[in-house]
Amino acid sequence: MDKKHKKKLKRAAKKKKDKAQSKQQQEHVKKQMNMFDRLPESCDACGKKFPKTREAHMSWRVTVRNKEQTVSLFCPDCTNKTKEFLENNNEV
Ligand SMILES: [Zn+2]
């Protein structure tokens, strides 16, 4: 086997691996999209409307109860309040 041929085989193997990885990634995205389909339109606690922006996706808290497949959504304010509440409770 000459060197050139070897290189070619190596590249083919890598391509196969890349393909498998991207398929896995697609499945992951698909799953996440399904989750966002079930996303409530507003905060579960105060009812503030969820702005469908990338920033909001990063700052709002989404909790999923996998058993019931229900998605709860909390705005940053309520997330902080819950956190404070929990922290205060821990202190008592
Ligand atoms: Zn809220």
Image (cartoon, rainbow, N blue to C red):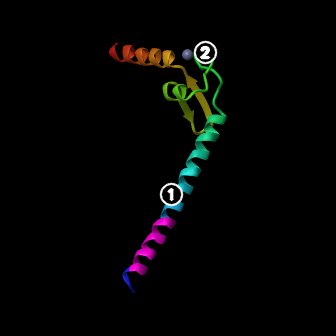
| Residue pointed to by mark 1 | 21
Q: Quadrant of ligand 1?
A: top right
Q: In this view, does 34 lie to the left or right of 89?
A: right
Pick whichever, 11 or 42, lies toward us: 11
Is 7 magenta? The answer is yes
Residue 75 quadrant: top right
Residue numbers of the magenta segment: 4-16
Q: Is residue 21 left or right of residue 4?
A: right
Distance from disc 2 to disc 1, alpha carbons, whole Å, reads 38 Å
Query: CB at mark 2 closer than 8 A to ligand 1?
Result: yes
- Residue 47 location, x and y as percent? 62, 15
- Residue 30 location, x and y as percent? 61, 46
Residue 31 quadrant: top right
Query: CB at mark 1 closer than 8 A to ligand 1?
Result: no
Are the residues tagged 2 and 1 within 8 Å (C-beta)? no
- Residue 63 location, x and y as percent? 54, 30
Residue 74 quadrant: top right
Q: Is residue 12 left or right of residue 46?
A: left
| Residue pointed to by mark 2 | 48
- Residue 64 location, x and y as percent? 56, 34
Pick whichever, 78 or 53, lies toward us: 53
